[in-house]
Image (cartoon, rainbow, N blue to C red):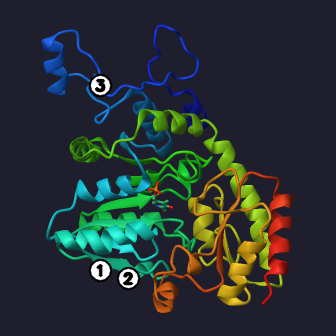
């Protein structure tokens, strides 16, 4: 089947009621016919569910769909994107190891790498999204993993996954790609040789701002390690959230197409707006990695960033002037959301640190929703007019 069909048709076994929509398996544990059946399940001789910290039919349906979409053998679903990222590190890294990551990554991932991994003797090096050729020189004998997002959050930089993968293969290290911004509807990192694919399912996979969730996907032998780590430490996804997310996948392709089409309309309009100094969107010709983005991605995705004239104060006024676009940190929602990173998510950094991560004072991040693009554009235009300092 085509992925669009798998996203809709893959399903867990149904009960004797012949439900069309998946039933919800809200149960913490599962029963056995006899002691021998129970022994065999615990000995991993059967695939039977034992306990929802290990596996659950709703969680498995989500994982099976995501494996079909990402083109991977196996996966494990977690309670949030961050628990997926964390598990993808902890299952493979130990004291003395080293990780090379792109410097432009999600804020909490940066905290996990710099504050926690280092505390356990795992060191790191960052390479710049604009200088991927530096990557190879950062690899050491103790390097075990390359970690990157593409597109990056919030900079929207694009990394060449084939290049990352060739460096990883040459040095025998794992390539771990956070595919949260593109989703498998727009790009499949496994096709370029990524070993691990991590997701925050909270964003475009849910797509409606309801639940948190995450996934790690990859080859069977690698996911076995992630499973063993999670089975013991417990960041497992709840069956209810898995049920919601599995339903969400049924509309992922349609949504990503529309998010991308609306985002392109907005990006093209912003590029011509006199109050906008610079617009970033992977499918704009002015994007520095535009050709690469077109090769790797089916469409540009739902996030647009721009630099407003007038710096931080103009950014603040812009947010205040928005009439229906939501001032909220989430992205990937049906509703258009807006943030001003310099005064919120990145306010604790120094000006210098912000600039290093590409957060200029007037940077605005828009996650373009599924409303009619004219309405989104009109709200953003009137807020831009009202933002002049
Ligand atoms: C939001 C996000 C995460 C973390 O996901 P949560 O579900 O919020 O824990 C990780 N990576 C990227 C790129 C994100 O945008």
- Image point 55% across, 59% down: which residue? 181
Up/down of 129 relative to 97, above or below? below
Q: Which residue is mark 3?
A: 29
Label 1, residues with CA under 10 Å away: few <14, some 14-19, many ≥20: some
- Image point 74% across, 70% down: which residue? 267
Question: Residue 229 vs residue 202: left or right?
Answer: left
Q: CA distance from mark 1 to mark 2?
A: 7 Å
Up/down of 227 relative to 125, above or below? above
Residue 271 visible here:
yes
Which-is-in-front pick, marks 2 and 3? 3
Q: CA distance from mark 2 to mark 3?
A: 49 Å
Q: Earlier in the sequence, mark 1 or mark 3?
A: 3
Up/down of 15 relative to 340, above or below? above
The quarter of the displayed image where residue 322 is located? bottom right
Label 2, residues with CA under 10 Å away: few <14, some 14-19, many ≥20: few
Per the image, label 1 sits on a secondary structure element best described as helix
Per the image, label 2 sits on a secondary structure element best described as helix
Judge by depth and name the residue closer to the eye, 321 or 353: 321
Q: Which residue is mark 1?
A: 138
Question: Residue 3 vs residue 36: left or right?
Answer: right
The quarter of the displayed image where residue 36 is located? top left
């Amino acid at each position: 089947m085509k992925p669009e069909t798998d996203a809709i048709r893959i399903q867990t076994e149904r009960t004797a009621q012949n439900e069309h929509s998946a039933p919800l398996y809200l149960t913490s544990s599962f029963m056995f016919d006899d002691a021998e059946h129970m022994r065999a399940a615990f000995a991993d001789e059967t695939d039977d569910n034992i306990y929802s910290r290990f596996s659950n039919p709703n969680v498995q349906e989500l994982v099976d769909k995501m494996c079909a979409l990402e083109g991977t053998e196996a996966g494990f679903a977690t309670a949030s994107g961050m628990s997926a990222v964390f598990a993808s590190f902890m299952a493979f890294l130990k004291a003395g190891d080293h990780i090379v990551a792109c410097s432009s990554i999600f804020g909490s991932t940066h905290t996990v790498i710099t504050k926690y991994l280092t505390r356990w003797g795992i060191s790191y090096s960052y390479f710049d999204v604009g200088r991927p050729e530096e990557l190879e020189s950062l690899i050491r004998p103790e390097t075990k993993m390359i970690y990157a997002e593409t597109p990056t959050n919030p900079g929207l930089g694009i990394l060449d996954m084939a290049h990352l993968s060739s460096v990883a293969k040459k040095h025998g290290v794992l390539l771990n790609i956070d595919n949260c911004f593109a989703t498998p509807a727009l790009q499949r990192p496994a096709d370029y040789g990524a070993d691990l694919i991590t997701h925050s399912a909270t964003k475009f996979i849910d797509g409606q701002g309801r639940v948190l969730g995450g996934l790690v996907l990859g080859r069977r032998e690698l996911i076995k390690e992630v499973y063993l780590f999670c089975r013991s430490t417990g960041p497992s996804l709840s069956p209810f959230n898995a049920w919601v997310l599995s339903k969400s996948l049924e509309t992922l392709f349609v949504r990503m197409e529309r998010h991308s089409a609306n985002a392109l309309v907005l990006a093209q309009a912003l590029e011509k707006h006199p109050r906008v100094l610079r617009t970033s969107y992977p499918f704009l010709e002015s994007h520095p990695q535009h050709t690469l983005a077109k090769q790797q991605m089916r469409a540009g995705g739902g996030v647009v960033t721009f630099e407003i004239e007038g710096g931080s104060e103009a950014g603040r006024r812009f947010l205040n002037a928005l009439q229906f676009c939501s001032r909220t940190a989430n992205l990937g929602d049906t509703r258009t959301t807006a943030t001003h990173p310099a005064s919120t998510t990145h306010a604790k950094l120094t000006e210098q640190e912000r600039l290093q991560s590409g957060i200029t004072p007037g940077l605005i991040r828009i996650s373009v929703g599924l409303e009619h693009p004219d309405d989104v554009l009109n709200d953003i235009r009137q807020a831009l007019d009202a933002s002049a300092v």
